[in-house]
Amino acid sequence: MTIQFSVESIEYLAEKLSDCRYLCDESLVYLTLQISATISNLLQDACKVLRKCRRNDLTTEDFAFALKLNHLEPMYGGYTTSSIERLLFHKIKKDNRILYHITDNIVQVDELIIPQSKIPLDIIHWLAVNGKQPEINENPIIDIPIRSTVLKKKLNKTSHIISKEQQIYYKELTEMCICPNEQKRKQALLILSADNSLQQILSRLVLFISEGVRVNLTPTSTFDRSIILKYLMQMSDALLQNEELYLERYLHYLLPAILSCLLERRISRDHWSLRDLAAKCCKQIIRKYATAINCLQQRTIDVFYRILSKNNEDYTWPTRYGAFIGLCEMSHKVIIQIVFPLIKQLGEQIQSISDIELSQKITETVVKYVTIAYRSVYNDKETNEKKLYEDFGSYFAPLIQHNLILLL
Amino acid sequence: MHFSSPTSSSPQNPISNPTNSLSTNNVLLLPSNTTSKMSFIIPNNNTNNNNNNSSQQQQQIISTPTSGLTTSINSNGINSISNVSLSSGQTTQQRLSFPQRTTSQSQQIPQEEFAKILRVLQENNMTESVEIFKKEYQSLFNKTTSSFSEPYFTALDGYISYVQEQPDTSRHEFSQLIYPLFVHMYLDLVEKDHAQEAQDFFKNYVQNTNLQATVFAAHKDDLFRIKSLVTKELIAQSEYVKSFRHNGRYWIKLCNASLELLDQFLIKQQKYPLLTKIVQAYFQLEINDGSARNAETQRLLSGGRLGEIKTEDNTNRMYYGLLRDHDLTRILQHKAILSSSTGADNEDGVGDDQPSTSKNRKKLKKDFFNQRQSKASLKVDPNAPQLTRIPIPELREHERMDLINTFQEDYSRMLKITPDNLPSCCYYTLLNGYLEINCLEVSEDSTLLAVGCKNSSIYVYSLNRRKLITMKLPSELERLDKSNEHIYEQMMTNDDSKDNTNQNNDSDILYNQRLLCGHTGPIYGLSMSREKWFLLSCSEDYTIRLWSLLTWSCLITFRGHTQPVFDVQFGPFGHYFASCSLDKTARLWCIEHAQTLRIYTDGCNDIETLCFHPNSNYIATSSSDRILKIWDLLESKEGQQMKPIRQMSGHKLNVCILKFSKDGRYLISAGYDRQIMIWDCSNGSLVTCLLGHSDAIFSMDLSRDGSILCTGSADFSIRIWNFGQLIKDKDDGKLDTLQRVTPSAKYELVTYRTKRTSTTLIHFTRRNLLLGFGVFIPPNDSTTKATKT
């Protein structure tokens, strides 16, 4: 709630609005203080309405109310009444600066003339029946509370029964997900990423993915399996995008499957995009579910780091690529702390690869990620060439430098 | 200057004549009505001020050498020539010799010296030294002016360290003073035109994490307000300062031992005259009997803008009992007549499974009505007010009929809620209404829902499948046979021709709706009378309107408030209603008069919500200083200002909702600070504080038998509490009074969660079915999108 305008902005406004070009610094400082305090007071008054109406979002009307209360000149226009979109302040974030604004659309006259017959429609549902909340779409999905540990144990023993409808739903959905028809698959993925009633069959869906990956990764399968793996990864990606689902309890199935796809040894057709997709899923899991308690991020990083740091040829280059991209997707912080020290050594090793296509692909990716991360830390325009060579070795340094210049 | 020791004012030896002590001492000792309590005020007469001034000046003299003038210059003088350090030494001497000059004068002297030294340096062509010297001078210059705030820093620091020295058992007693001292000092600094130093002072203490957790935790709301007061003019205008400084003294309760120590520190030692001055001018200390209070208790009761509540303020008698004989006996009388004429036919409706409320017991024995009445009149609740204390009009015929039906139909089939038999909850989600709907109200019989909107219109919906009834036109009414016993039903229209437009919506759950237009500003409060005839609404346009729910028109506009009206509520028997407003008053009205009956003023604080006592003799209000007040409807003596009969402090943020328990003894309050506090009206003490919600609490209701408390919150949940058990434990003495915060698990029965709806209205039907109402809050797409990209 601290409001502090900068002197510069007040100076600019003073010049713009009232042609006060020659305000001395002292008066500007005083003016800034006054304005900051006045706005803060007005906001406090506006909050009275906010509190009275039990809302969370401040509207322009609230501020108009505060102006009225203080006998100040009222606002003209800027009232936001019709659609919710226009009511709320939107947030723009750029260069670590946050700006809030209202999208001011052009309103057709017809819309204004027609009385806003937006009758608040209400929906009735049973929130609870005899102390229990029925599992219907109107009710939120409840994570089993910690209190009922006894109940949880019981649940584990009894098999999880799903209704006939849900069984059909599951069957149709999984079939759609791995059918060759592009359109159908897209539809199915959309369902996965948006439907919140999936929680009941979620455990089976996750099992489907994990089993699918396991079966298709075994060397015995003969046909081209990467396409199926890709579909499965798309499924997990869609599930992770669904905000309403709680995947936390199934991570021990989901994460190993994803990591297997990311770090698989063998090379199949189009395996690069499969790895990229898996890395994306991995990133999302860590973003969503990593906590200090489960050490998810630390454990995943450990896996990747072990692969990358070993000098000998224990791991194939595609696997190393997977580990690398998995690390890079996590965050800039991870890149800076873990990937940066590895790059010099990586550069030396890459030079020894005979496959040109392979080395090119890896080099491209490394340079791409490292440059962006580097830019985020050292934001100055002049890049220190010496330091670059020191940090990244003679193979990567010129490439990174080139890309840095391109970014400018 | 001496302060007579508290022993002289001990209970055994009270000073009978206060003026005597005034003349003999600088100290005024005012023994209050009860001898065990003592308050001391020391007048700010001239001699006192002079003393303070001189000692302040002394302190300035002492403080100047420590301001780092010599040391910093010398340390920097290493890389400059000796000439400089010598001349800088001269400046310090000069500063020391003119300590009593005003700051503007003392600024000039070093400026001359500064120019000299600068010239010398420039002559010798030492650019680096010039730079450093300039910088150093700048920092010193600031320091010399900041010496004004120095005594403030030292005094508060001194007091804080003094508090730290105290033993653990009584440290919290002393720390009560830190917050008000801090605020007064800050305001002082700003008022004396030292805005920058005041800001430093503010930052220094507020950002101290230790203080944040202990002292300032209860006053976060006000700290924001204080921070925006940066100039003298703002302080002069500020309502907050008005209510903090001029609305009374900051009330602090201490135990006797602590007070003696404090007296020793502040008055005898006079180490920090500034502190003494502030305490004398703005504080009032009250002695608690016995030993120091528990730190937890003190923490719970703190939070009011002006500290705690004077114990004396809550000593007047409050008749919190119910009017058992009022409407119920009259209903029974009526029923007795009925049954005597028609024979005892509907006896069967009264089964054994009904709850054992006194109402039903009475009903069972209706045959012995006459005896019963005499018994009942003998067994009058000693805490109940007399029937005639506040005149209440007789019930009308149809109301009586309604009440009888209610008891037969609903109360006899009321569900008993126990931990094994939890209530079902039917939830009404209002869509498309976020930021549009301001308030909701449901009728007592749960059949009508009124919605107050921002665009100043009011919608009334029928919640059951029945159409909203309308009274016939006057010309048609004239034609009716008035002797007919079904006259009330015949007065209403039966033809639906008017409602043809709504026929299409038959499938809709909202069977019927009405729009009431008249206000010219957003609606902030609604209240429906018990018999569903009237609806009250209050609005930003300073007016309250009474609407008829039979003719669907506005009957009266009540004018009187001079600021937006925030809440309005009917009394439990109709007829009276109360309103509260941002003009800092609560008012009592009667629907038969357009004028205000009573005005309750609350100094400098907005009154935000109110609630009627079930016996219609009192109203409770909550104001922006976070103190709950209970007012008497009975007129005070001529010329006297209305004073609240009870005051309760303990909430740390604004209160959203107040409710009296069904037996009228307890007041329950909840609000933005997530605490549900239960107060005993008999003496204004805190029974307990329930915690559990993780966001502001907006709504609350008690089950019809008064045993279950239900709260709805902004954390998208409804919690059910076993209120009956809590009161029972309290009466048995099982409730741990030392630890006033009751862990939620002990009395919380169940939590119901909603998806994205914060429950703004919660209501038990007559059969104890729970109804929840809330406006769906659409997820804010724009912000999430922005963060994703």
Image (spheres, rainbow, N blue to C red):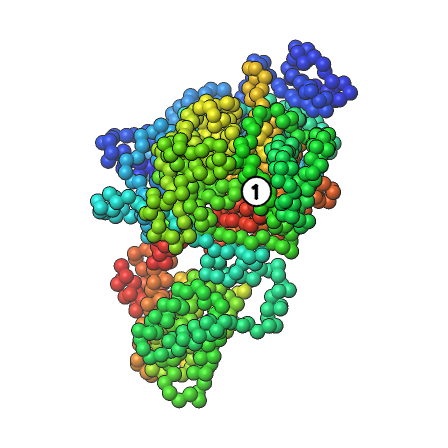
Please provide percent x and percent y for residue A138.
46, 58
Please provide percent x and percent y for residue A183.
31, 73
Please tell me how many numbered marks the rendered image carries.
1
Pick the residue in front: B649 or B767.
Answer: B767
Q: Quadrant of residue A62?
A: top left
Pick the residue in front: B218 or A343.
Answer: B218
Please provide percent x and percent y for residue B543.
41, 29
SS of the residue under disc 1: helix
Q: Quadrant of residue A131?
A: bottom right
Q: Quadrant of residue B389?
A: top right
Mark 1 highlights which residue?
Answer: B405
For the point 43% across and 76% down, the residue is A171
Relative to B429, is B87 above or below? above
Can residue B313 be seen from the camera position used here? yes
Amino acid type at circle 1 is Asn
Is B590 on the left-hand or right-hand side of B30? left
Relative to A199, is B403 above or below? above
Where is the C terminus of chain B found, in terms of image quarters?
bottom left
Is B3 on the left-hand or right-hand side of A189? right
For the point 56% across and 50% down, the residue is B769
For the point 78% across and 20% down, the residue is B12
Q: What chain is tagged by disc 1? A: B
Please provide percent x and percent y for residue B9.
73, 20
For the point 42% across and 21% down, the residue is B105
